[in-house]
Amino acid sequence: MRLQPTKRFEVQDEYEILASFEVIREVTNGITIDSTGVGADSNGDKFIKKGMPMAKIATSGKWVPYNPDGEDGSENPTVILKRTVNVKDGDHVVGGYEVGKFIKERIPVTVDAALIAKMPHIVFS
């Protein structure tokens, strides 16, 4: 007989990205992610990690991951993605944070001075 505990289920992305719950503001009704703006991996999946800074594309009004070298709006992030999402089957509407304090080591891109300057409502600690 086995007496050791076993996991009954595993929650995706259990790690916490918020450094504080005191002042946060979520995007009302979520953001629509443009699946064509996300590159696919070797399996065809198009994952965007939880905590990714997201930017709105000027022409479509949809959102893509932050690209510091972009020239289509992707260089100006304003939202932090609330959960990991796979957009291989098309566009998805997901939650995001407009205001909050985040743990910078858990953000999936380098948090540098340029990113901090572009997101004045987001605090990285």
Image (tube, rainbow, N blue to C red):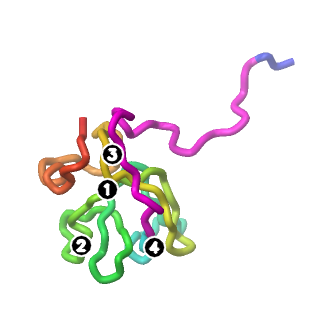
Q: Position of residue 75 (x, y in %)?
A: 21, 66
Instruction: Tell whether 87 sits left or right of 78.
Output: right
Q: Residues within 10 Å of mark 1 (few under 14, many from 20)?
A: many
* Residue beneath disc 3: 107
Q: CA distance from mark 2 to mark 3?
A: 20 Å
Q: Quadrant of the N terminus?
A: top right
Question: Label 4, label 2: how many angstroms apart (C-alpha)?
Answer: 16 Å
Q: Which residue is mark 4?
A: 35
**The quarter of the displayed image where residue 8 is located:** top right
Specify whether residue 27 is painted magenta: yes
Magenta highlight on residue 5: yes
Front: mark 4 or 2:
2
Say whether disc 2 or disc 3 marks the residue closer to the N-terminus: 2
Segment tinted magenta in the rendering:
4-32
**Three-letter amino acid code of the residue under disc 2:** Gly
Residue bearing mark 1: 53
Q: Which residue carries the number 2 mark?
A: 73
Cα–Cα gap, marks 2 and 1 = 13 Å
**Mark 2: secondary structure:** loop
Q: Are marks 1 and 3 in contact (CB under 8 Å)?
A: yes
Query: What SS does tag 1 mark?
Result: strand
Q: Nearer the viewer, mark 2 or mark 3?
A: 2
